Image (cartoon, helix red, strand yellow):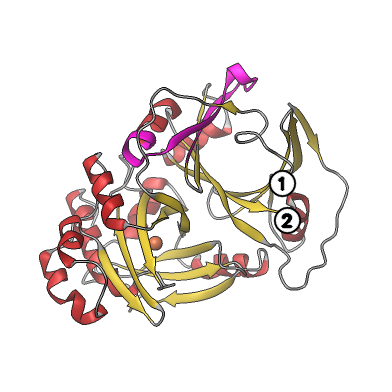
């Protein structure tokens, strides 16, 4: 594998979208033990083995396992020694999302266009080559220690990218119907939501498509505020949460305490059949927030007629919400780590483009029961 840093400048004068994104390329987690994490995500969520990098492929200081299900790609990376930025990240944050990688046509122009608008460089444009072609990467910092990497892979036909080899495993649990990343939510500190909204607007050309204040998102005890940022074509959506004052500690504050700073709170993953997917996930041991029976007594009055039977939704704890364009079904896992930090949302959209505002109260009350059980409310 060759590595080259691109020095020369290319120009992209597109006024309409200076950062055209083709979607999420991958989500990379820094974890304490990538071998075991890969086994967990394969077993519990039905990811398939895709690629591997480590000492055997010339990577001396870390190991990465790449797992995939449909268009959903996760990279699980662990350091092989103690004294390096990956080990520092895990020491500070526990297991968590380091990279939200975005697929682009041109990683060099993505870097230049965002840097000139004020982004902090994380990775200068770099060309990686092997016998399957080339991948160009570049990266910028976002909230906390999280980064965006721009991935240009139009000239690559290998399994993942140079430096990795195909990972063929004899252990291949069946898929669970997870399709792609619907949205990724960031938790930021007090008074930091608007500065990060501005970052996504000015540096990345996103727009604010929805806002929720603490009146929308508050329960008896804890509160938060949220703004949803979307890129031009809507393929990439990043809601940003900040804590708000309530009688007790906000769930966002609990996250910030345990993650030791700002970071990715949840990754929402799309399915076409939430009942089938969540039944399978629960059978494999994935735990979800439980929703009281009272929620289901009134939900259809609020959302109107839906195609699904209510009974399986109630049995699984799936939430329902409706907007002007349709409805959605969603469910939230418990944290995937021992720290109450990253969790997954599973979402099936039936026309709705929103994020389940009507469920916030029921959802946050469920979260608070968990938070209270941990002694953190
Ligand atoms: Fe969400």
- In the visual, does 95 lie left or right of 308? right
Dot 2 alpha-carbon crowd within 10 angstroms: few under 14, some 14 to 19, many 20 or more? many
- In the visual, does 82 lie left or right of 11? left
Residue hosting label 2: 110
Please say if 260 is above or below 15.
Answer: above
Q: Are marks 2 and 1 in contact (CB under 8 Å)?
A: no
Which residue is nearer to you in this view: 255 or 98? Answer: 98
Q: Quadrant of ligand 1?
A: bottom left
Circle 1 SS class: loop
The percent position of residue 52, horizontal first and vertical second, equals: 55, 27
Circle 2 SS class: helix
The percent position of residue 124, horizontal first and vertical second, equals: 75, 44
Dot 1 alpha-carbon crowd within 10 angstroms: few under 14, some 14 to 19, many 20 or more? some
Establish whether ligand 1 lies closer than 8 Å to the Cβ of label 1. no
Displayed quadrant of residue 84:
top right
Establish whether ligand 1 lies closer than 8 Å to the Cβ of label 2. no
Q: What stretch is highlighted in magenta?
A: 41-68
Numbered mark located on residue 235 in the image: none
Mark nearer the N terminus (2 vs 1): 2
The percent position of residue 111, horizontal first and vertical second, equals: 74, 53
Distance between the Cα atoms at labels 2 and 1? 15 Å
Please say if 201 is above or below 65.
Answer: below
Name the quadrant of the C terminus: bottom left
Residue hosting label 1: 154
What residue is shown at x 35% (from left), y 55% (from top)?
346
What residue is shown at x 23% (from left), y 54% (from top)?
289
What residue is shown at x 67% (from left), y 64% (from top)?
203
Please say if 295 is above or below 22.
Answer: below
- Residue 169 in the magenta stretch? The answer is no
Could one spot residue 218 in this view of the protein?
Answer: no
- Residue 64 in the magenta stretch? The answer is yes
Could one spot residue 75 in this view of the protein?
Answer: yes
């Amino acid at each position: 594998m060759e590595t080259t840093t691109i020095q020369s400048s290319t120009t992209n004068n597109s006024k309409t979208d200076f950062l055209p994104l083709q979607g999420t390329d991958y989500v990379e987690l820094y974890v304490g033990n990538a071998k075991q994490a890969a086994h967990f995500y394969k077993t519990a969520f039905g990811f398939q083995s895709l690629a591997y990098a480590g000492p055997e492929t010339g990577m001396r200081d870390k190991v990465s396992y790449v797992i995939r299900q449909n268009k959903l790609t996760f990279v699980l990376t662990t350091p092989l020694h103690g004294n390096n930025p990956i080990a520092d990240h895990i020491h500070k944050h526990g297991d968590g999302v380091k990279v939200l990688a975005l697929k682009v046509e041109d990683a060099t122009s993505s870097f230049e266009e965002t840097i000139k608008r004020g982004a902090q460089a994380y990775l200068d444009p770099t060309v990686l080559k092997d016998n399957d072609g080339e991948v160009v990467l570049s990266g910028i910092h976002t909230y906390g220690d999280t980064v965006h990497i721009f991935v240009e892979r139009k000239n690559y036909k290998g399994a993942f990218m140079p430096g990795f080899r195909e990972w063929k495993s004899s252990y291949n649990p069946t898929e669970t119907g997870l399709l792609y990343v619907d949205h990724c939510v960031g938790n930021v500190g007090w008074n930091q939501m608007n500065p990060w909204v501005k970052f996504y607007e000015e540096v990345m050309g996103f727009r604010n498509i929805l806002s929720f204040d603490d009146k929308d998102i508050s329960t008896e005890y804890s509160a938060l505020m949220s703004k949803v940022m979307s890129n031009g074509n809507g393929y990439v959506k990043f809601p940003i949460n900040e804590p708000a004052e309530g009688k007790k500690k906000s769930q966002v504050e609990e996250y910030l305490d345990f993650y030791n700073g700002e970071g990715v709170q949840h990754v929402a993953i799309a399915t076409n059949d939430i009942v089938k997917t969540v039944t399978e996930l629960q059978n494999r041991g994935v735990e979800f927030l439980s929703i009281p029976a009272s929620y289901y007594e009134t939900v259809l009055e609020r959302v109107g007629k839906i195609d699904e039977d209510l009974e399986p939704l109630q049995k699984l704890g799936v939430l329902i919400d409706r907007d002007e364009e349709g409805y959605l079904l969603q469910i939230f896992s418990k944290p995937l780590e021992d720290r109450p930090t990253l969790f997954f949302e599973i979402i099936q959209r039936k026309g709705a483009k929103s994020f389940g505002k009507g469920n916030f109260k029921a959802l946050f009350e469920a979260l608070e029961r968990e938070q209270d059980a941990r002694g953190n409310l």
